[in-house]
Image (tube, rainbow, N blue to C red):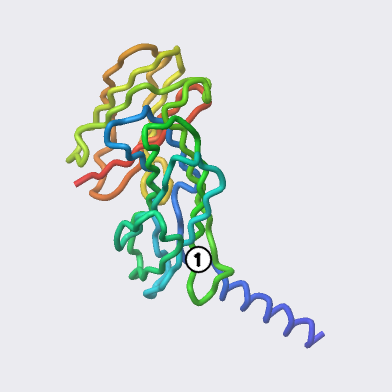
Amino acid sequence: MKKYVLFLFFVALTGIATAQNFTLEPSQIDTEEPLNAQNDNAGYAIVTNTSSSSTTYVWERNVLTIPDEWQSAVCDKVRCYLPFVDSQEFTMNPAEEGDMIVHVYPNQVEGEARIEVKVYEKDNPDNTITGVYNFFIGVTGVLEVTKSLTKLFPNPTTGEINLQLWLDQPAQTQVEIQNAQGQRVALNNYGRLQGENLLDIENPGMAPGMYFVVIHLDDQLFTKKLLVK
């Protein structure tokens, strides 16, 4: 009996030792954009150290699918890296947030890419989270509703939020605001829209910080990063 109790105690301690001490939100990022003159498209996520101590993490990029003409690169809380850099470590203070951004450079070639970024604790590699970044650049017909133009402004903002949205097909439209932890702080319903629309996004007076504006078009999702000052 004592051995059994000791075994359970050991299992409990092991579970505590390997408990998740950071988050990556959102864990799936879907980006659909037209080809642009800047040749730069990005998917945004936020890493947060939820522990009570300073911790060093490592990110690793894994390109699952990408056109031959494209390149990709990662920006973390420290800096943006050149495309040949596949892994890097960074340190975060307690409750600190930081970017985990994937850029793709299509070189004026339409296509799709799927890129994973695995983030793990340096001293405990089993403590890991993987973010999946999906890119649909200049591709029409891949999603049921294609987004020809979106613009979120002002960004950064002190409270006012506007979304310019152009839809080439009718779509039931909702705009959700999530905080850096992926929690919903506002939801706006606009009914079924088509063509060019300028939407005033109501929000509950958000505190300064990083947020995500999630655009729901029927059953498709598009995410924009928003900074509130």
- Above or below, 177 against 100 in this view is above
What's the residue at 39%, 54% (across, down)? 83
Residue 167 image offset from top left, x and y in percent? 39, 17
* Left or right placement of residue 28 versus residue 79 in this view: right
What's the residue at 20%, 41% (across, down)? 156
Q: Quadrant of residue 225?
A: top left
Residue 192 image offset from top left, x and y in percent? 43, 13
Front in this rendered view, residue 192 or 56: 56
Locate the N terminus by quadrant: bottom right
Front in this rendered view, residue 14 or 82: 82
Front in this rendered view, residue 210 or 146: 146
- Above or below, 128 against 55 in this view is above
What's the residue at 50%, 22% (across, down)? 218
Going by the numbered disc 1, the residue's amino acid type is Tyr
What's the residue at 48%, 66% (across, down)? 21
Residue 185 image offset from top left, x and y in percent? 36, 40
Q: Secondary structure at mark 1?
A: strand
Q: Which residue is mark 1?
A: 120
Q: Residue furthest bottom?
A: 2
